[in-house]
Image: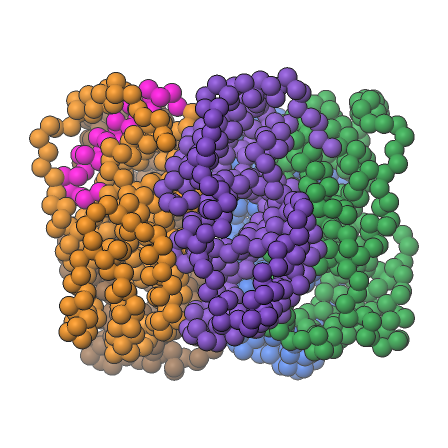
Chain colours: A brown, B orange, C purple, D green, E blue
Amino acid sequence: MMARLHAIALLLLWSLVGSWISPVYAGVDREKLLAEPGIYGTFAAFALDEDWGRLEPSTRIARLAALKGVVEQHREHVAIDLYLLRGLSDQADLLFRIHAVELRDTQEFLLDLRSSQFGKHLKAAGVMHGLSKKPNYAPGFPEQMKADLKTVSEPGEKPYAIVIPIRKSAEWWGLGQEKQAAMMQEHTEATLPYLKTVKRKLYHSSGLDDLDFITYFETSSPEDFHNLVLSLEKVKEFQYTRQFGNPTLLGTVQSLDEMIEILAQ
Amino acid sequence: MMARLHAIALLLLWSLVGSWISPVYAGVDREKLLAEPGIYGTFAAFALDEDWGRLEPSTRIARLAALKGVVEQHREHVAIDLYLLRGLSDQADLLFRIHAVELRDTQEFLLDLRSSQFGKHLKAAGVMHGLSKKPNYAPGFPEQMKADLKTVSEPGEKPYAIVIPIRKSAEWWGLGQEKQAAMMQEHTEATLPYLKTVKRKLYHSSGLDDLDFITYFETSSPEDFHNLVLSLEKVKEFQYTRQFGNPTLLGTVQSLDEMIEILAQ
Amino acid sequence: MMARLHAIALLLLWSLVGSWISPVYAGVDREKLLAEPGIYGTFAAFALDEDWGRLEPSTRIARLAALKGVVEQHREHVAIDLYLLRGLSDQADLLFRIHAVELRDTQEFLLDLRSSQFGKHLKAAGVMHGLSKKPNYAPGFPEQMKADLKTVSEPGEKPYAIVIPIRKSAEWWGLGQEKQAAMMQEHTEATLPYLKTVKRKLYHSSGLDDLDFITYFETSSPEDFHNLVLSLEKVKEFQYTRQFGNPTLLGTVQSLDEMIEILAQ
Amino acid sequence: MMARLHAIALLLLWSLVGSWISPVYAGVDREKLLAEPGIYGTFAAFALDEDWGRLEPSTRIARLAALKGVVEQHREHVAIDLYLLRGLSDQADLLFRIHAVELRDTQEFLLDLRSSQFGKHLKAAGVMHGLSKKPNYAPGFPEQMKADLKTVSEPGEKPYAIVIPIRKSAEWWGLGQEKQAAMMQEHTEATLPYLKTVKRKLYHSSGLDDLDFITYFETSSPEDFHNLVLSLEKVKEFQYTRQFGNPTLLGTVQSLDEMIEILAQ
Amino acid sequence: MMARLHAIALLLLWSLVGSWISPVYAGVDREKLLAEPGIYGTFAAFALDEDWGRLEPSTRIARLAALKGVVEQHREHVAIDLYLLRGLSDQADLLFRIHAVELRDTQEFLLDLRSSQFGKHLKAAGVMHGLSKKPNYAPGFPEQMKADLKTVSEPGEKPYAIVIPIRKSAEWWGLGQEKQAAMMQEHTEATLPYLKTVKRKLYHSSGLDDLDFITYFETSSPEDFHNLVLSLEKVKEFQYTRQFGNPTLLGTVQSLDEMIEILAQ
């Protein structure tokens, strides 16, 4: 649907970038950062400013080279994922998900991004931080449920990503571990039918921003995801939720190169 | 009331557009997209920027040619309806309703729209997504009500469209199917007198944005619509609604050509 | 207090306008539109942009001629009242009240206003729609109260206008007609002492925007109006109000020519 | 701490102003306006625009001459107090408190202020209106409390001013005069220890804006004021308050000449 | 990660600054201001405007010299700490924490900052004021807890700072000292495990802004801080909190020179 960047422009882009990042690039252990507890996950959303759409194509390509450069350079320290929100979410156009061992490394990436030639066109539209942790309630679940939870999501492209920030009520926190665990078991049961088609990741936020949790999803079927949320609204634990979404961020997963191609237009 | 575009300018517009979209244009099966379950409906509202009103008429016409081009081109994949909100709703000037089998197709249309010469004058003012589904409660309704619900809305122009986003309370979701069905029967009963003059379509949203439902209406009588809403406020189910409107979008239905004619001024 | 427009500039203004509106001007039946049920009332508030204050006086006068032209032209179809909010209300500077048989006529006026040379300096700050209806509860009131309600407000200038949007709670709508009528009788009793000095008009909004009612007042004594509101806060029906004001619009009634004279400075 | 305006610039300023306001200036009876019931008090807050800081010093001085001119001119009809909010409150930089017999006089001052050369740099950040009234509950208080309330605040500079808007709950208004009076006596008792160091003035707002009261304070000790508010939070009447502050405006009292000197930098 | 300022530019910066602040600089007793009761603490957050990123490096360095000058000059009267929020918090980029004996001194610093060449690029993003006080409940705690509370936080860098504004419910203020003390003891117990790794400071705000408390934290481990907040959410006193964060400000502690180096890029 979208006009393709001419090969010549892309070549120019790669050569511009190539000249200031080292050709041999080791990088952080992305898989480990996404799998382990104790890792900080940051979701930073940005809107493109009004000037962006008015830039000459050649200027735009030069600026995107700066984006590529900053992302590649910091991928040595932090894991960076990109999402295109424009068209599917309000106000924000781009979302970066950054996993890091230290929040300072995340801040350094975002500072460099903002002060880059590309970053001058970004307007901050929201940032959320969470922490990956070992499962809280799962150890007490019935054996069958524990086995079910090991279901691996189906292979294949999951082009849609959804981020839903969550804040629990003060009443929830006062319930005590036992009552919470019983409700979380009911909650978890409701998610089982969707384990194959909806991938989930949970971040704990209390104190790091104005949330308690950030829930992250990837799916090839927004309809399945909608049905999952409907199921979760019906369990008792949902009564103790005082913020669910607001904003809900819905976008598409993009590689850095795909994102650059889209933004180049 | 509004000055008419000179025939010459319109001719110029058609010729500009004609040169870059194919004359033979098949298009998506619009009727099917609007009637079937499992289709995504997106409502994207935009405000025109301050520069728009200051453009030279000839520039404005060229930009509107870009709008026409993008809409025609994407109508091969998605169904697109246009509404004029300016004057009747806060902040937003235009509303696009897009029906698609895949949300990615909707995103592609909106990306192309935004990056077109016309789109540079649009400021995103809100986007909502929903899904068409088979009726949830209707199968259990009394036979007479089922028959009544088959009432077809009167033919003829329905120039006004109203979009009301809805969010139910956590309590509603915890009620269970039976209690919900009883209340929805009372709710539906209240709508019967308006089936002829107010056309409705329901979208399910949970998880796709910060809503549970998007309700869409077309009518030739805003007064009838007002009386319908008054009736719905009086049934028990309304007590379980925590968002109704906010925003309520009220506008007029416009064909692409009518919209272009209005914006050309 | 304000510097007066030089006679020469005003003459210029009248001559500019005179040249493009017909000298014989019939117009809509304003009195009828303001008195009858089934008429749409729209309140459209605007802020002047920052450029307005920086215009050359002669440019400003030319733009005000455009305002005069648009208002005069549409007065053939809709009734238009003007209010100056600047200095008395937040953010919005001007308020238009438009009465029309069809909301489309209101939209056409506001479209023409926005696309006029004057309208390019307006930023939409809010629009509300309501419908005039026959009294709902009055037919059941005691005869004495019905007689009292016929009190005509004192003649003479009522320079202040106040618009208060109202939204009732879901609980109110569920009360049923009888309980509502009893409370509305108490409410109405509280208003009797102010019938002479505060003129009122009620608009029904449910479904047309995010309100249930728009209440409009004119008075020569804001103190009397304040005491009226205090009385209304004390009756039982007020407990069922979940939005009262927010915003409250307070301004002064201005004729088109007075408004132009003020804006010309 | 702040660089002083050179004597030459100030001389220039006085001479500019001197030439267009009459040297003999009678003025409104300020003391009477601040002491009597039935007087309207308006609080109008403004932010300086971004251009202000970039003006040439000589231009800035000329614009401040316009401020001085407008204030002096209107002081014949209304009492005007100035406060510097910048640095101590969010968003707003300046606050005007205007007392007038007629709200129209206040509007005329604010219109002239806004259309002056200085006013073009002001962005409206909020306006609130209230009315001075005779004490509501005091007549029923015990004699000792009435005597205590006659305590005059200590002479001497009270450089800090705080404005706290208040809205009571619907429940409060439904309590009835007797219960309210008992609670207001407890409330008043809590204020007695602070009568010497915190000066207070109360404005009644219902219907004139979205508040019920505006409370105004002057003090030389923000710590004393803080302790006063803490005491008031502990009495029963505070449970019936649904808005207290939001915004709280904290600033310093400035004469017109002091304000001009500060803004000249 | 960030490019270093060339030695030459820094030399230029020091020499620019050196010429207008006195070389011998006594300064306020910072330690005393941070330790004693009765001291005002102000948190002022700012966003950098869009022009900042577009300045020539040499201009930027000159402007940062102005920042350095203003801070050094006012450090004679107030204690000033700097924090970098960009990348970790929404909207605001910089945070100043100012301790002063008199709020006027804080206002003077912020006025001079805003009117400096650097300050012209700052947009106010929020200001909060509080007062240090002697511990309220601690004198009644058990001896062991009092001893535990003397735990000194571990030496070493604590690069992260978090500011959480707090507002208690009206119900809390009505509980009375005894019930509050019992709950605050439970609250304090929950904090003991984190005394070593999370440094805290409490400010009392009621009446000075729209908060009751400002809580300030420094830590080397955001994870520890997260666990501390989780513990505090579980105690009974948390049920009486109606605002916790909103906004939560998370940033990194920076010396003036480090901040200048970062902003110079």
- Let me know if residue A75 is in the magenta part: no
**Side (left or right) of A154 relative to A212:** left
| Along the viewing direction, whichever of E78 and C217 lies nearer the viewer | C217
Q: Where is residue C261 in the image (x, y as percent from the top left)?
A: 62, 29
User: At x 73% / y 24%, what residue is drawn?
Assistant: D62
Question: In the rendered view, would you say D94 is above or below E130?
Answer: above
| Along the viewing direction, whichever of A70 and D49 lies nearer the viewer | D49
Q: Position of residue C215 (x, y in %)?
A: 53, 55
Quadrant position of the N terminus of chain E in the picture: top left
User: At x 29% / y 73%, what residue is drawn?
Assistant: B186
Q: Position of residue C177 (x, y in %)?
A: 44, 73
Q: Where is residue E140 in the image (x, y as percent from the top left)?
A: 70, 80
Quarter of the image holding residue C153?
Answer: bottom right
| Along the viewing direction, whichever of C174 and D88 lies nearer the viewer | C174
Quarter of the image holding residue B171?
Answer: bottom left
Res D85 seen here:
no
The region drawn magenta spans B55-80
- Let me know if residue B66 is in the magenta part: yes
